[in-house]
């Protein structure tokens, strides 16, 4: 990790959460009137069934720490190296910021829309994301590094996203979040001796929340097929690549975190890509060709450029400024080359809904 991201105090953790850059989770605002115009009538029966699932709230008692949590924590943490500690804390802060970003966005949409279907969905999703963020924050407080969520909400910069971008980005972030958590959970299910923090025991039911959130946006897209046609395919392609690339670069900055779980960052990421590609067949007529040799080369190039950019940031003066500009241009060029690679065409599944069976 770059020294600038070292987390030692609560102030460090809160500053990390407030950062806004290409790799950090962002906070968003959107056009509430446009959300009011969204209709789910073509999938009404499936939508109502999903709302009943949310109402059932099968995870209402899940995000509570059991009696063995602290015992397991006390036995695991002394074995961490300082480097693993930093990567785990970075993972916690980044994950909390991402979950809380969703909570803030969904609450704002809920408060400002009149569309009863969207209002109901956002109420449930904000509830779930609030639980997730709070649960992670408890683990940060174990290290006296809790995030001040109220201050984070007021201080972190916001980015405006049109509803169509919110729909694509939320669907992908929830589905790839599921793929990430279930891959980790299955690995530690096979190798419990590699579980170096008790929070991983919660990942299976936790990731089912993420999966259900993605299902909601899948239904919205299937009910509004214009979102999946024409020039919108170019937008879908962009968001697929942006989400995959961000995850890949971020994960390669935490090699020890994956190693401690018995995973290797590249192999782990490609397993997550594979699962996400399978899932997105429910809505997206295209998928990234993750087996294309130039795709792999391009992803590795982005990691190398990100490291070079960080090195340039540590330099002061004109040389540092020129270095950042140069590596920023290199990153853009590498991303564009990846964007122009051939994609796979795929037929949508007949059923819009899927089940989390991985």
Image: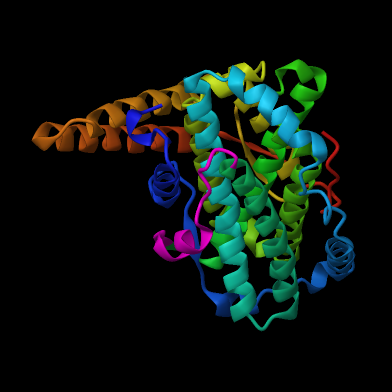
Residue at horizontal 60 percent and vertical 17 percent from the top: 79
Quarter holding the N terminus is top left
Taking the image as shown, residue 67 lies to the left or right of residue 227, namely right
Q: Nearer the viewer, residue 111 or 149?
A: 149
Quarter holding the C terminus is top right
Q: Is residue 321 visible?
A: yes
Residue at horizontal 73 percent and vertical 28 percent from the top: 72
Q: Position of residue 164 (x, y in %)?
A: 57, 63
- Tell me which colouring the rendered structure shows: rainbow
Range of residues picked out in magenta: 142-158
Residue at horizontal 78 percent and vertical 20 percent from the top: 192
Residue at horizontal 56 percent and vertical 76 percent from the top: 32
Q: Dividing the picture into quarters, in which one does residue 183 lie?
A: top right
Q: Nearer the viewer, residue 142 or 238?
A: 142
Q: Is residue 229 visible?
A: no
Q: Is residue 330 above or below residue 351?
A: above
Q: Residue furthest left?
A: 318
Q: Position of residue 344 (x, y in %)?
A: 64, 35
Q: Nearer the viewer, residue 170 or 97?
A: 97
Q: Nearer the viewer, residue 6 or 297?
A: 6
Q: Position of residue 265 (x, y in %)?
A: 57, 21
Residue 153 falls within the magenta-colored stretch = yes
Taking the image as shown, residue 77 lies to the left or right of residue 298, namely right
């Amino acid at each position: 990790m770059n020294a600038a991201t070292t987390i030692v105090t609560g102030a460090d953790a809160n500053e990390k959460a407030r950062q806004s850059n290409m790799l950090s989770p962002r906070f968003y605002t959107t056009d509430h009137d446009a959300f009011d115009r969204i209709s789910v009538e073509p999938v009404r029966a499936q939508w109502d069934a999903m709302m009943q699932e949310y109402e059932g709230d099968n995870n209402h008692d899940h995000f509570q720490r059991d009696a063995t949590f602290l015992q397991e924590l006390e036995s695991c943490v002394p074995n961490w190296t300082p480097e693993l500690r930093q990567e785990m804390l970075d993972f916690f802060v980044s994950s909390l910021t991402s979950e809380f970003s969703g909570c803030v966005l969904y609450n704002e949409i809920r408060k400002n829309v009149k569309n009863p279907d969207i209002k109901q969905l956002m109420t449930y999703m904000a509830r779930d994301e609030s639980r997730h963020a709070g649960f992670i924050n408890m683990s940060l407080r174990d290290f006296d590094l809790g995030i001040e969520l109220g201050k984070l909400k007021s201080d972190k910069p916001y980015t405006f996203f049109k509803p169509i971008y919110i729909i694509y980005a939320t669907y992908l972030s929830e589905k790839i979040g599921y793929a990430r958590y279930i891959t980790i959970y299955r690995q530690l299910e096979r190798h419990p001796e590699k579980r170096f923090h008790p929070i991983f025991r919660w990942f299976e039911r936790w990731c089912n929340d993420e999966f259900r959130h993605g299902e909601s946006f899948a239904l919205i897209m299937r009910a509004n097929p214009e979102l999946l046609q024409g020039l919108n395919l170019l937008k879908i392609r962009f968001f697929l690549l942006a989400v995959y690339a961000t995850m890949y670069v971020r994960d390669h900055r935490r090699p020890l975190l994956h190693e401690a779980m018995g995973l290797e960052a590249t192999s782990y990421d490609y397993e997550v890509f594979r699962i996400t590609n399978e899932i997105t067949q429910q809505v997206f007529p295209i998928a990234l060709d993750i087996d294309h040799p130039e795709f792999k080369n391009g992803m590795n190039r982005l990691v190398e450029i990100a490291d070079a950019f960080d090195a340039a940031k540590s330099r002061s003066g004109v040389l540092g400024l020129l270095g950042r500009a140069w590596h920023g241009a290199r990153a853009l060029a590498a991303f564009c080359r990846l964007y122009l690679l051939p994609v796979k065409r795929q037929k949508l599944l007949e059923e819009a809904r899927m089940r989390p069976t991985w």
